[in-house]
């Protein structure tokens, strides 16, 4: 066998096949472990959302249930765009560029929307500038972003980041400083994905989370850790 710098070794076909089979066994083991984890995630309980959240959109003020557009499932992109920002988050914008036609979601009874804290007028102008067509709503002036930890501010709601409370962050550190949460961090916007299930005309249940941030009362929203989104949303399932 020969070596070419940092490149993989050059071997015979038989040696390559033996190495590939060894790796395949590890891949299968990882797949089975991931399937078991996904099944366990699907068994996590859901929490009913009773708070009357409202959002501003092209047709005025609407409720959380209105965002479903009559479908039973709702996927929400928590797009980082603060009220005093001149434009949306570049990483969130890059992700939004990958959102194409929503037909395949709609035929699967799922609605996709984006929600940000900036006033709707800013969102509408930025959406037009970027050439996007997905629905985008503003949660400006409401508790929604704080309750779902898309905006972190201990003056409004308890901080929860990476499944850790403010006290736990004192020991573990925040992802961007490795130190405790400090008051100058209040107002931090966070990206993420939430998935909700509408089980009746008057209620919506959350059905998924991302990897790093959990809601304060059960499995309620999807959230990304630190300042980079890492998605882990699962397929919604009916309520028991």
Image (spheres, rainbow, N blue to C red):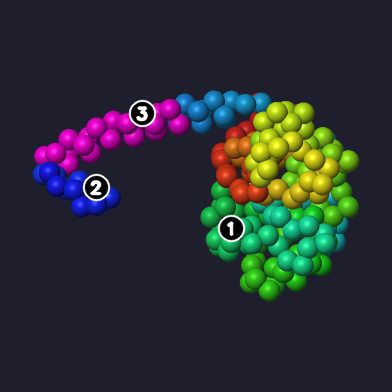
Give the residue drawn at x 81%, y 67%.
Answer: 121
In this view, 131 is above or below 106:
below
240 left or right of 186 in image: left
What percent of the width, then of the height, locates residue 205? 71, 36
The rendered magenta stretch, by its main secondary structure, is classed as helix
Query: Alpha carbon of mark 1 to alpha carbon of mark 2: how far?
Result: 33 Å
- Label 2: how many Cα within 10 Å (few below 14, some 14–19, many 20+): few
Q: Secondary structure at mark 3?
A: helix
Give the residue drawn at x 70%, y 72%.
Answer: 128
What percent of the width, then of the height, locates residue 101? 56, 62
In this view, 168 is above or below 145:
above
226 left or right of 16 in image: right
Q: Is residue 230 visible?
A: yes
Q: Secondary structure at mark 2?
A: loop
Q: Earlier in the sequence, mark 1 or mark 2?
A: 2
Mark drawn on residue 95: 1
Tell which of 85 and 103 is nearer to you: 85
222 left or right of 55 in image: left
Q: Is residue 46 visible?
A: no
Q: Earlier in the sequence, mark 3 or mark 2?
A: 2
Label 3: which residue? 29
Q: Earlier in the sequence, mark 1 or mark 3?
A: 3
Label 2: which residue? 8
Query: Per the image, is 25 magenta?
Result: yes
Give the residue drawn at x 78%, y 46%.
Answer: 185
- Label 1: how many Cα within 10 Å (few below 14, some 14–19, many 20+): few
Say which of marks 3 and 2 sits in front.
Answer: 2
Tell which of 32 and 212 is nearer to you: 212
- Residues rendered magenta in the picture: 14-34
What percent of the width, then of the height, locates residue 133? 65, 66
Query: Alpha carbon of mark 1 to alpha carbon of mark 3: how far?
Result: 31 Å
- Label 3: how many Cα within 10 Å (few below 14, some 14–19, many 20+): few
């Amino acid at each position: 066998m020969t070596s070419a710098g940092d490149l993989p070794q050059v071997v015979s076909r038989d040696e390559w096949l033996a190495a590939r089979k060894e790796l395949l066994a590890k891949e299968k083991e990882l797949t089975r472990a991931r399937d078991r984890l996904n099944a366990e995630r699907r068994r996590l309980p859901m929490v009913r959302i009773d708070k009357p959240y409202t959002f501003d959109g092209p047709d005025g003020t609407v409720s959380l249930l209105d965002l479903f557009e009559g479908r039973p499932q709702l996927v929400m992109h928590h797009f980082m765009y603060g009220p005093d920002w001149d434009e949306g988050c570049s990483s969130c914008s890059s992700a939004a560029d990958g959102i194409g036609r929503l037909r395949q979601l709609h035929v699967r009874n799922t609605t996709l929307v984006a929600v940000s804290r900036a006033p709707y007028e800013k969102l509408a102008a930025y959406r037009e500038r970027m050439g996007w067509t997905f629905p985008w709503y503003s949660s400006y002036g409401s508790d929604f972003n704080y309750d779902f930890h898309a905006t972190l501010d201990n003056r409004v709601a308890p901080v929860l980041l990476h499944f850790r409370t403010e006290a736990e962050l004192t020991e573990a550190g925040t992802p961007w400083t490795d130190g405790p949460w400090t008051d100058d961090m209040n107002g931090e916007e966070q990206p993420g994905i939430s998935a909700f299930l509408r089980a009746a005309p008057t209620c919506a249940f959350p059905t998924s989370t991302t990897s790093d941030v959990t809601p304060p009362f059960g499995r309620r929203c999807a959230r990304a850790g630190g300042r980079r989104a890492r998605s882990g949303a699962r397929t919604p399932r009916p309520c028991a």
